[in-house]
Structures are given as C-alpha cells and as structure tokens.
Image (spheres, rainbow, N blue to C red):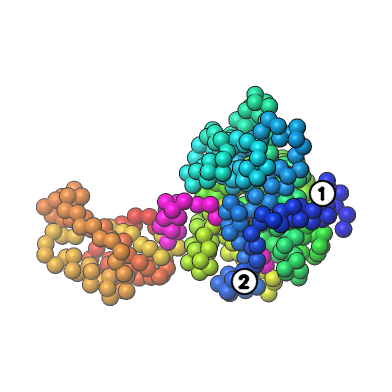
C-alpha cells in the first residue's frame, strides 16, 4: 500500500532495530473483563510498563539517535506534559548530550522529579503543553539548542510506529486498534505501520471531550486551535495538533471516539482493580473507548493501547475516590437527627438492613443550625451501584429522614 508519507514501514522497521537494545517487551495481555464487557476479544498493549513508564521513549530515542554531532553540540530542548520529557531526558543521557525540558507548571511532581533524575534541566512554564512549547521555542533560539518535537517530527513518528509493528506481528488478524490522541504522533506512526501490514485493520483514535483538537480538526478539514483544554488526562491535553499528523490521521485513521473524564476514571479503576495495571489518565483513555457502544466491537479482535503509567500516589487516591463515587460504588450523604438517644442506632439499623457497609461516619452536634433540636450526621457507605443507593435513600426516607447527597 503506497501511503505517500515521508516515512514507510521500512523506516519503522529500522527504528525498531535501533530501539531493540533499550526497550522492555510489552506483550499483549488478554483482558477477560473488557472482553466480556465489550462482547469482543480485547487485548491490552501495556506501554505503561515501558522504560520511563510510557511509549514516548520510542520516538525520542529514534530521533536523538539520528542527530548529527552539530545538532547535538549545543544541547537539546523539548516541551512536554511529562512522558516525552522523560523519553528525551533518557535518550539524551544515553547520547551524553545535555537536555532542557520545559513542562507546564501543573505537571505532576512524579514526572518532574523523574525527568530531573534522568539528568535533564527542568523549566516549569505555562498551564498546558502549548504554553510550555512556546516557552521552549524561546529558550531554543536564545541558547541555540536543538528542539525535539513530541509529535510533529517524522523520526519521532517512526519511533512511535514501532508499537503498531509489534501489535501486528503478535496479532496479525486484529480488527481494531484503539489509540490515544494528544498531538497525533502516536496514532500516526501506528496507523502507517498497521495499514502497511494489514490494510483491513481499523485504527481508531481516542480523545477526551475536553481536549479534542484532532477530532475538531478532522471534522473541519483544517487545523483547529482550542481556546482551552480541560481534562484529567493531562498527557493528551493539547490545544493544537500539527499539519503532519492531521494529514496522516485524515487519510489512515478510521474514526475518533471522544470520552468523558468519568469514563476515563472508570477505565482507570478497571485497569487497577481487574487487570492490576496502573495507568495515568491519558494512558487509560483507549480503554475508556471500550465503553462506547457505537464502536460496535462485538465479536472483533481489539487492541487497546495503555500509553503510560506515570502517576503519583496522591492522584491515584483522588481518582479512586472520585471514580468510586461516580460509579455508585461509594455514597456520601447527610441526615439531620433529632438530638436524643437512640437516633444514631436507628439510622445504623436501616443501613445494616440494606447492606450498606459504613466506611466513615461523622456525628457533629455543632454543625446543625438549631443545636438544641437536631444534629447533623454525615455518612459514607460502600454500595453496589446506583440502584443500591436508591434503595438506601428510600429506606432512610421511609424511616423519617431527609437525605442530602454530597457528591452524587
């Protein structure tokens, strides 16, 4: 299949040879849970287990390994929300070249520290990748550095395309590949490789609703710059893709699915709880697309790419808490009790009868406006979904209590 791009399957195979000594194998993992849920044969490509915790090492290393001595002489610079930063820092260290990385000020500390530990100088600037990129371009000119773009670069795209090569070698009859989209370099490389090997395979991109620059650009048939980005998936929070990646996606990608932050949290929880895999939110978005019935994956062989797993413990805790609430697995509410003996026991009995396991209870006599007459009781319980929550609320109301939801 002639694709008329600056790279071919041969370039991707050459990149694979360069990368072979440094990459960890990330063999496909069959998922019983996602397969049953989607009615398909679902495999996961766990790039969260890759060197530096994400796929980005592939493109960064392939690019830096091909720089001339002149290009490396002054040092390298890159802009990144985290994973490209670590890829560039790792590859620069291997090449014994100094690297500067500009990251958004909101970048999780785990990504900042990991980048510094790989020997890079880190500059924090801006609210998102695009802001950091603008700042990096200024430093590039001022200090005469070589810029390593995270997605608008053919050598980077070829490096990312090695994932498509590996998937098709392991599962040549795959029907669907679900791939996250940020700037589009990852899906561009995978689409070039996969379509060259098997033109029948469908490559589908996945973006958050709050950062859907590629979706809007494909629809408009021109580059669209988002006014702002808002998503828990910081790794794909890009305001503008590139002409290069838009061209490839428009020609080779079979569709783009948008997912909500709630669906991303649900995918994150499933990966953690069922698959024992930790993914960052951006790394989980391809799995979030498996919840979309419009994809019609019934009976198909599907590969969902987990693109990264660089996430700190505090963020994991917050995602678990929020995710459980959104899924109806945890219910937090308040009731006002008459301030007399036995009322707390009565509420506890109702909860026990309805199999609501109490996680936390706060009995606050000073929170109520009318201290003498009533007391505010705040309870968090473990539940089995929204039907169970409704049953608990109905039982409490039948017992004479007015229920105030906290986060549902």
Residue 306 lies in the magenta stretch:
yes
Check disc 2 and report the residue beneath it. 30
For residue 57, side relative to residue 262 (left or right):
right
- Residue at left 66%, top 37%? 97
In the rendered image, is residue 52 in sight? yes
- Residue at left 65%, top 62%? 25
- Residue at left 61%, top 61%? 46
Q: Nearer the viewer, residue 318 or 208?
A: 318
- Is disc 1 surrounded by few (<14), some (14 to 19) or many (20+) residues within 10 Å? some
Whether pointer 1 and pointer 2 mark residues with C-beta atoms closer than 8 Å, the reply is no
**Number of marks in the image?**
2
For residue 382, side relative to residue 206 (left or right):
left
Label 1, secondary structure: give it.
loop
Quadrant, the C terminus? bottom left
Which of the 4 image quarters holds residue 326? Answer: bottom left
- Disc sitting over residue 59 in the figure: none
Residue 223 lies in the magenta stretch:
no
- Tell me the magenta residue range: 302-324
- Disc sitting over residue 7 in the figure: 1
- Residue at left 21%, top 55%? 376
In the rendered image, is residue 111 in sight? no
- Is disc 2 surrounded by few (<14), some (14 to 19) or many (20+) residues within 10 Å? some
Please say if 93 is above or below 10.
above
| Residue 295 image point, x, y percent | 66, 64
Q: What is the C-alpha distance between the residues marked 1 and 2? A: 31 Å
Quadrant, the N terminus? bottom right
Q: Earlier in the sequence, mark 1 or mark 2?
A: 1
| Residue 201 image point, x, y percent | 76, 64
């Amino acid at each position: 299949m002639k694709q008329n791009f600056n790279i071919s399957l041969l370039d991707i195979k050459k990149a694979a040879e360069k990368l072979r000594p440094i990459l960890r194998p990330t063999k496909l993992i069959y998922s019983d849970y996602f397969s049953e849920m989607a009615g398909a044969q679902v495999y996961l490509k766990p790039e969260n287990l890759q060197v530096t915790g994400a796929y980005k090492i592939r493109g960064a290393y392939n690019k830096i390994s091909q720089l001339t001595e002149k290009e490396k002489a002054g040092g390298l610079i890159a802009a990144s929300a985290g994973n490209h930063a670590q890829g560039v820092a790792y590859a620069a260290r291997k090449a014994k070249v100094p690297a500067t990385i500009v990251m958004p000020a909101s970048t999780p500390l785990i990504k900042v520290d990991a980048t510094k530990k790989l020997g890079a100088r880190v500059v924090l600037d801006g609210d998102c990748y695009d802001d950091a990129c603008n700042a990096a371009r200024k430093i590039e000119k001022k200090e005469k550095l070589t810029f390593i773009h995270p997605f608008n670069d053919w050598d980077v795209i070829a490096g990312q395309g090695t994932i498509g090569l590996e998937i098709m070698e392991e599962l040549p009859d795959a029907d669907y590949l679900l791939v996250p989209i940020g700037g589009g370099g990852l899906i561009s490389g995978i689409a070039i490789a996969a379509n060259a090997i098997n033109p029948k395979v469908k490559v589908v991109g996945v973006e958050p609703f709050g950062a859907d620059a590629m979706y809007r650009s494909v629809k408009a048939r021109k580059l669209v710059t988002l006014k702002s980005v808002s998503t828990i998936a910081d790794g794909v929070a890009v305001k503008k893709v590139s002409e290069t990646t838009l061209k490839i996606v428009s020609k080779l990608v079979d569709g783009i699915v948008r997912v909500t932050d709630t669906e991303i949290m649900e995918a994150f929880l499933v990966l953690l709880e069922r698959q024992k895999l930790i993914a960052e939110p951006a790394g989980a978005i391809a799995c979030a697309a498996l919840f979309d019935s419009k994809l019609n994956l019934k009976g198909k062989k599907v590969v969902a790419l987990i693109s990264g797993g660089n996430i700190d413990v505090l963020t994991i805790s917050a995602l678990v808490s929020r995710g459980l609430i959104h899924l109806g697995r945890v219910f937090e509410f308040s009731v006002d009790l008459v301030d007399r003996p036995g009322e707390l026991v009565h509420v506890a009995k109702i909860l026990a009868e309805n199999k609501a396991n109490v996680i936390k209870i706060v009995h606050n006599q000073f929170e109520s406006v009318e201290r003498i007459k009533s007391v505010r009781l705040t309870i968090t319980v473990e539940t089995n979904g929204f039907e169970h929550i409704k049953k608990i609320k109905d039982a409490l109301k039948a017992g004479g209590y007015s229920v105030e939801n906290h986060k549902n």
